[in-house]
Amino acid sequence: MIGDMTAPNLRDYMHKHGLDTPPPCKYCGEKASELDHVRPKTGPSRGKDPHRWANLQPACHRCNMRKGSRMPGAFRASLSRIAGLAGMPTAIKFYGEGARGEPLKRLRKILSSLTLWGGRLVEIKPGEPFSKPKTKEQLEHKAAKRELYRWRGKATFAGQQAAKALAAHAGYSPPTVERFIMGAGVTEDARIKLELAAKALHLDVRALRALKPNG
């Protein structure tokens, strides 16, 4: 609800219910820090009035973020699938439904340390921000882009002149030519045309890549 000035917040909820301290999260039972839309305010399940009190319930930031724009049933199904892949019992019961003891401990473990990404079970390391696992191709592309930024604007005079000649011959902008030289990604059509242009100009792309200062 950040940025949505029309939506009630947890302070409004506490005032409405006469509470002096934040209530427990309806999912995991820990202290709530915000309000969750039971029926999400965005997406295909969005209701006509998502900010009505009947559609709002206290939640901690972790549960609210993990639930996202899903209905509670879909949220439960996702957590159940994670539990199954982790070898845990798949029956997921929320705090607001009466969960206590071991079921609640299991739910908190799933919420804090395990998630699904691309259908695979991924561990969230404590104290470290979770990031999407990278494929080999993505890692190679990232490394190529890193080299591109080092190369760009720092190539030797010979490298700059060769890149300009290649850009003029193929009809592409210098940044596109630089990405091609460093292998940082261009369209297939651009790659073919630039390879032909490099061949016509007797330019070795690997040699061009090396025409940059050390460091």
Image (cartoon, rainbow, N blue to C red):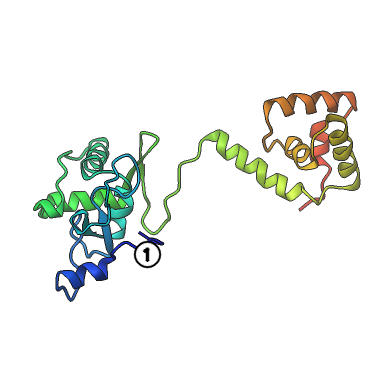
Q: On the image, which quarter does residue 75 sit in?
A: top left
- Taking the spot 38% from the left edge, 61% from the top edge, the residue there is 4
Above or below: residue 202 compared with residue 173: above
Toward the viewer: 123 or 18?
A: 18
| Label 1 SS | loop
Q: In which quarter of the image is the N terminus?
A: bottom left
Total tally of numbered discs in the picture = 1
Residue picked out by circle 1: 5
Q: Is residue 6 left or right of residue 58?
A: right
Q: Residue furthest bottom?
A: 20
- Taking the spot 54% from the left edge, 34% from the top edge, the residue there is 136
Above or below: residue 131 compared with residue 206: below
Toward the viewer: 192 or 117?
A: 192
- Circle 1 packing at 10 Å, graded few (<14), some (14-19), many (20+), is few
Toward the viewer: 84 or 27?
A: 27
Q: On the image, which quarter does residue 84 sit in?
A: top left
Q: Residue 181 location in percent, x, y?
A: 76, 36
Q: Residue 206 location in percent, x, y?
A: 79, 33
Q: Residue 213 location in percent, x, y?
A: 82, 50
- Taking the spot 87% from the left edge, 40% from the top edge, the residue there is 164
Q: Residue 156 location in percent, x, y?
A: 87, 47
Disc 1 marks a residue whose amino acid type is Met
Q: In this view, does 30 lie to the left or right of 168?
A: left
Q: In this view, does 164 lie to the left or right of 64?
A: right
- Taking the spot 35% from the left edge, 47% from the top edge, the residue there is 42
